[in-house]
Amino acid sequence: MAAAESDREVPSALCTEFLNFSAKDTASKWLQVTDLYKEVYQHLASYVPKIYCLGPNLNPQSEDLLAQLLLQAPLEWYLCGEDPSMGLAKLEQNNQPSQLCGHVFRVGEPTYSCRECAADPTCVLCMQCFLGSVHKEHRYRMTTSGGGGFCDCGDTEAWKKGPYCQKHEPNISDSCQEVNSSQPQDPLAHLSTDMIARCYNVFSIVLKYAVDMLTWDKENELPLGLEPPDRGDTYYCMLFNDEVHTYEQVIYTLQKAVNCTQKEAVSFATTVDRDGRKSVRFGDFAFCEQAKSVIVRNTSRQSKPLRVQVMHSSVVAHQCFALKALHWLGHVIGYSDALRRILCQVGLERGPEGENSSLVDTLMLCDSKMWKGARNVYHQLFMSSLLMDLKYKKLFAIQFAKNYERLQSDYVKDDHDREFSVTDLSVQMFTVPSLARMLITEENLMTTIIRTFVDHLRHRDLQGRFQFERYTAQQAFKFRRVQSLIGDLKYVLISRPTEWSDQLREKFLEGLDTFLELFKCMQGMDPVVRQVGQHIEMEPEWEAAFTLQMKLTHIISMMQEWCATDERVLIEAYKKCLTALTHCHSGFTDGEQPITLSICGHSVDTIRYCVSQEKVSIHLPVSRLLAGLHVLLSKMEVAYRFPEQLPLSELSPPMLIEHPLRCLVLCAQVHAGMWRRNGFSLVNQIYYYHNVKCRVEMFDKDLIMLQAGASMMDPNHFLMIVLSRFELYHIFSSADCRKRYNRENTNKDVVQQNNTLIEEMLHLIMMVVGERFEAGVGQVEGCDQIKREIIHQLCIRPMAHSELVKALPENENKETGMERVIDCVASFKKPGVTGRGLYELRPECAKQFNLYFHHYSRADQSKAEEAQRKLKRQNGEDTALHPPVLPLFSPLFASLVNILQCDVLLGMLGAVLQWAVEPSGGHWSESMLQRVLHLIGMGLLEEQQQLENSSEDNDVSFNFTLKISLCGCILGPGEAPSNTASVLALLENLQNAHHLEVHKDMIRWILKTVASIKTIRELTAFTCTVTASGSHGQEEMVCDKDKAERKRKMEMARLRREKIMAQMSEMQRHFINENKELFQQSLEELDASTSSSLEHSPTSSDAALVCVGPRRSCPREKRQVVTCILCQEEQEIRADGKAMVLAAFVQRSTVMSKNRKRPPHDPEHYDPLFMHPDLSFGTHTGSCGHIMHSHCWQRYFEAVQAKEQRRQQRLRVHTSYDVGNGEFLCPLCECLSNTVIPLLPRAKGSSSCEQPGLGQWLKTSGQQIKAMHSAHRKLQPISVDAVEETVEEGCPAPEGFRVDYTPTSPYSSTIKEMLTTFGTATYKVGLKVHPNEQDPRVPIMCWGSCAYTIQSIERLLVDEEKPLFGSLPCRQDDCLSSLARFGSACWTAASQPSVQGHFIRLVAALIPDPQVETSPCILDIDMLHLLVSVVLSYGSVHSQDSSGLSVDAVQLHLFHLITVAHMVQILLTSGPEEVTMEQESEGAEREEEEAICCLYNTLRTHLGSSLPEVGSGWHLWRCVKTGILPYLRGAALFFHHLNGVPTPPELHALCPGQWEVLCGYLSLPSNLLQLYHSQQELLEPLLHGWCSHPSLRQTLQGGGVLVSFPRESNSLIDLPDDYSALINQASSFTCPKSGGDKSRAPTLCLVCGSMLCSQSYCCQTELDGEDVGACTAHTFACGAGVGIFLRVRESQVLFLAGKTKGCFYAPPYLDDYGETDQGLRRGNPLHLCRERYRKIQKLWRQHSITEEIGHAQEANQTLVGIDWQHL
Ligand SMILES: [Zn+2]
Ligand SMILES: [Zn+2]
Ligand SMILES: [Zn+2]
Ligand SMILES: [Zn+2]
Ligand SMILES: [Zn+2]
Ligand SMILES: [Zn+2]
Ligand SMILES: [Zn+2]
């Protein structure tokens, strides 16, 4: 590329210029000139293109350096009038910084707000300020910043309390000054006028330049004065960001358009996304133009094309510098508040074009045309200048408000996220209460916002109501942008005024007017008509309207709260709202015929209207706002104090209730199933209408409106209208309505419908009379309402904090107010290791329970009913759930109680009771009766309460008892009373009805209450003195109740219990049938565990138990019989029997690794024979312990395979297991498995003939090995050279050893097959290679897995502080036994010479063998692995031995030898002596100390100075004893499981003296040194051999990894107690690959503590030919495929296994309520829960992570579909 060459030359040319350049001279020249503007522009015109944008590969470092020297330095010189390093320092010194912190947040940085003190939730503190503030002791909220925004510390308007942290607290002396001068000082006072003038000049030129360039939209020209002296044909092809195209599209297109690699394309796309634009090609015009056309062509197919511009390099250069210049301005004003003020002044100075023409205006108005990067930079400058200066913040706010409409419109059209829009700054101004108020009064901001909002909602129907189009994703996107206006309105209203000026009143009411205009468009929108006949064809649109309603909910509440702070405003608002409502429903529309209704001699005029036939809408915001204001009239007592100012006479109660009533009837009809054909859209609307998010301004207000209307009406009239709207009038109006069962048996559905409607109507009446917890409706405090909500939630069941929060309405500050009252009504129960903390209702609150609580759904209601009845039964109380005692109504609503005793209601009650008396017919329902009883109960309680509260005279007009005892007929006018029974009589009648068993408690309670009221009335009538005696009398009455009553109750209870028991056992039977398998399993497990515990128990208690060697105890011969979980047949374990297998999961593991940095080996050539003591990689085998026939398993697995293939073809879905990789789920417990282990019988007991001593055996085995060497050589004719070198040709084999003998396998064919299966699986997984059953490494991997699994279990037992034996679940015992026995048999499935070869090499590591070339040094061998491998491989040698040598004897010799080697290993690696107090040793120990010193000194003679001198034997002996213990324990586990020897009871507990017992069990002297000293002459040469290994000295001197013993268990990393420390740590973490960028999903590896940049393109790497995310890649390096991470931003634990498996897991951080906060949504402070963290650690240590993932994926199928490898 030609261009690339030329840009090499320019810098050198520049260099000379640079050498001659003097910033000082330039500045002094500038001081002389008259037209500074022109001069500086010239300077920029000539230098900027020489520095910036000289080639395709920008070099920001040298650019910045040059810009600093050539461009910024002269400006600074000019500004300061001296050396800027001096001048700026002086400025800083003289500066008196403001008390604002103003720290601008990085993305992901933690921010803190105080729920108690913050003016609104947008007020936040940075971490530093928070830690130094009073709020850290308060109930604070923690969130992570989305970037932008700044710390509000020091802003007195933002905090009700504690506005300053310690750092920003004003000095007392300062504040005194401020008090004296009353006005804050002008920061300019410290500056000389000269300085001010210069500063002004520079700032205006630089800012103007920056604004010119950033708003410049020509691609090929520059503004006047900036044209470069010489312009070449150099262009950039500039790609801009949009939110339409995906990453993938952009990457793909770029690869095509500019021929770049995928990596480069990813980098381009990342930059475009971050900065908003990026040059993707540099060259001449045509070259760039060509790329542009390819990009446009490629991206224009589905949507509008990507924006691309071909721009001249000088334009780009100036734009780059313009950004730099803005940065510079921000930097310079940081030195001094004075400079900041000057910049603000410059920025807001009105330009030549007049209004809104300042530079700041220009920038704002061009905002949506700029690219992201430019916007970010200038927004930041605004924040650090205009918003930090109190004077100019106000002026800026005014400009912002003036431009508001235009800015918002630009934003709505733009497609960038809100955080990149200047409109996002609104939060910084509107939430400041004084500014907001000023903007309302002076700029009429409230009206502007609402008007702008309405202007953007254009869709109207003929009546002018909103009518939204189908709510598509794009619509939703647009709508969301419009909604940001609602957010702004919320900011403005969030703090309520404490004082009102006339102007504020005027502007607020003007705003309210506009708001009502909006509401008028919403009143009656989206009306529905009942569909009859067929289903609706298309679900009508409803979401948009509801979204609107939902978004406005808080605004509506806030408007009301504003009104509540000023009586005059309230009165005016009420009038306006009433006018609006009248306007909406001016008169009744056509078709609404007037009619007259009459019942019981009462009649009312209304209209004919059927909800089921005409249009009805759920949206009635005007009515509901009026309802809200009406309550306020009562609450603020305006209604009583200024009745003359209210338009009460204009109110028409029937008009008020009409629409809310229709809406409630609609809900009832939907419940009754009358609207089924209207589809889901209506169901959804009804759901949201009642939902906690909407109900405050929907359902609740409708109810209030009904209460308001009814309180102004004759109750009989009200009820008749209700009956009519419920379309039930005809049922209750007829004279013989009590005989409904006779007349109306026409259509079952209709009867059913009407029953439900009656139930719903009765419920509505209860609510109208009983819902008195809204302050203003009833005489209650504000907190009574929330208390009641909580009580009723907790009556359902105990709940967690977050559940309660979800069930309660939140205010605009996202607070429920629950904290204030929760402790009065509930007690907190802490969580355990799982689950969460729960609140339980205090028992004394249960009496406030109301079964018909208006916010219960039907499901809630029945759950609560059940729970409360159960509770009452438990407490031995009467189970009647009678209504609670209610608070009094406010005077305005007081007349509502009369509904209870009005004729129409009593008529209805009587009718329902009468129906219930006649059980046949089914024209009534139990819940109908239950409601009637409840209503009667309410009436009685009302009367009782009034009696108790009334002063002396019985002026209580409410006489419910009288009414219900009167003859209960509904009298038409002039009708003669017929002999119908009274309500009371009917109740007495019902008391004995058999079919009403459930309600008897309630009826009894009613009758009892009636009686006690009568007593009160009589008492008060008798002695009008003390009313309290009335209640006494009542109590006595209760006491006096005859014992027969109690007896009957007990009898009842017994009957009920029996019934319940019968039900229970029925349920249980059902359950067992359903879960047959499960029960089978648990029974089996029981069997298995009993059988194994028998095995553990010692055979003969006298003899000491020994598990290895010729003296080993013989286990009792016992047939081992197991049951196959698949076919349920029993099978004995025998070598020649059918194979039984254990489901198993083999996985690679690094859990015990002491060296995670060891590079992964080359799987094809790796020799796994010796395990390094660092245990860097191991193979772990686990099992769920479920046993199958091998053939049953094979059939099962084939079936799974076949099913999976079909499924994948059909659905292409993933599963939680990979069949292709041999994975399957255990058919019983669904535990992830990938192979099976065959079960084998244990080894036979030893023969008792004389066995050779160590010396004899060493000699024999040496001969055997030689014989094998030569035999093997014969098999390999190739190595002729080697043959020549050997010492003796054909050495004689020892007696009885037949090298040519090939033993026959003792196993049946199925067992042989399974031996191969498990061996191959271990080999495949452990080495990550393709299966190859012939590979000689197969047995090695099996032995390795056996040793590794034993070691990991041994560690686990230590960590869990459990005894060595008897504490493992039997599945692990079974697994270990089968692993050990499998290991001893696996040689039969491999080639004998190769296994013998392994044996020879293993032995050679201890006993030098000249024919084995490379043996590792003993420091590089893990001794337990060596022990297991050598013991298990010996079988292949022994099979050729017929001399009578017993396996046991050999095992013991090998074991002793390796034990000595391990002691030497420990001595070599034991560190220097720690300075400890001299320990006084016991006599017995002294012997050991001497012996150990002796051995150590022998080693020192061999090794000399490589070993430090150690004085005390005590230290050495302690090192050996602690260091060797894990090995001995491992060996004990191994031999126990291999030989099946019972374990000594002492090892089943953690008691002292374990060492001796352990040594005894292992056939070792408890002074281990005896092993060495008793055979010193035989062992000395070996010792010498080990010490003279060449790499030993090297390792000791630091040349290799030195592991010391005992190896400590690995733990997960330490986590900080406070979660915010982690957030903070993560927020400063930068992506390691994209130079200093913040990572979006910082993720912490809990195993090693690395922080990773997860879920991001930048950090993807290739793993086995696939792109994987940082976590997956790390998983393979750190955890051999298994990973445990903490996603810091999400507060979520992530488990990964392999590339396809993963799940999320509850984090170990809990809030004070004992709950996690996944996703950090609630923001409560989180603290580490150590138990939970330990639980995660345990999962990891016991290798259960993969299993956990499997279970999670099975339980939640969506987890399977996640692309885990990209995390
Ligand atoms: Zn701060
Ligand atoms: Zn602070
Ligand atoms: Zn606070
Ligand atoms: Zn079977
Ligand atoms: Zn299982
Ligand atoms: Zn790690
Ligand atoms: Zn990254």
Image (cartoon, helix red, strand yellow):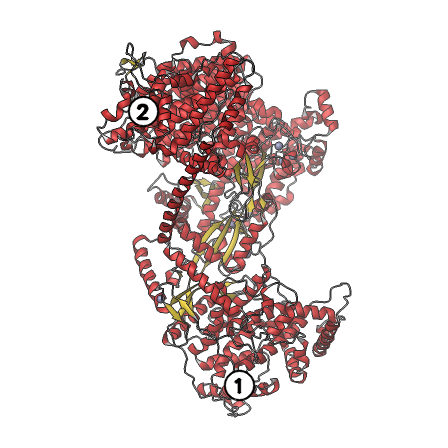
Q: Residue at x 56, y 16 (%)?
A: 1026
Residue 752, how many percent across, how many down?
28, 30
Whether residue 456 is situated above or below residue 962 in the rendered picture: below
Place of residue 631 in the rendered image (x, y in percent of width and height, measured from the top left)? 47, 18
Q: Secondary structure at mark 2?
A: helix
- Mark nearer the viewer, 1 or 2: 2
Q: Earlier in the sequence, mark 1 or mark 2?
A: 2
Position of 1479 relative to 213 (above/below): below
Which corner quadrant of the figure contains ligand 5?
bottom left
Task: Let me know if residue 1761 appears in the view.
Answer: yes
Left of 244 or right of it: where is 1494?
A: right
Measured as percent of width and height from the top left, residue 1183 is found at 46, 63
The amino acid at mark 1 is: Leu
Nearest the viewer among 861 and 646 is 861
Give, as a three-letter code, the residue at label 2: Gln
Residue 1654 versus residue 1068: which sits nearer the camera? 1068
How many discs mark residues in the rendered view? 2
Residue 1063 picture quarter? top left
Residue at x 67%, y 72% (from the top left corner): 1468
Question: What residue is drawn where x is 50% and y is 30%?
Answer: 847
Kindly identify the residue that appears in the image at 42 percent across and 46 percent down: 247
Q: Which disc number belongs to residue 1445?
A: 1
In depth, the one of 849 and 1481 nearer the eye is: 849
Front one among 1051 and 1203: 1051
Q: Quadrant of residue 1569?
A: bottom right
Instruction: Tell me the number on the disc at residue 914.
Output: 2
Distance between the Cα atoms at labels 1 and 2?
A: 100 Å
Q: Are marks 1 and 2 in contact (CB under 8 Å)?
A: no
Residue 795 drawn at (x, y percent): 47, 35
Placement of 1531 over or under 1025, stated as above or below:
below
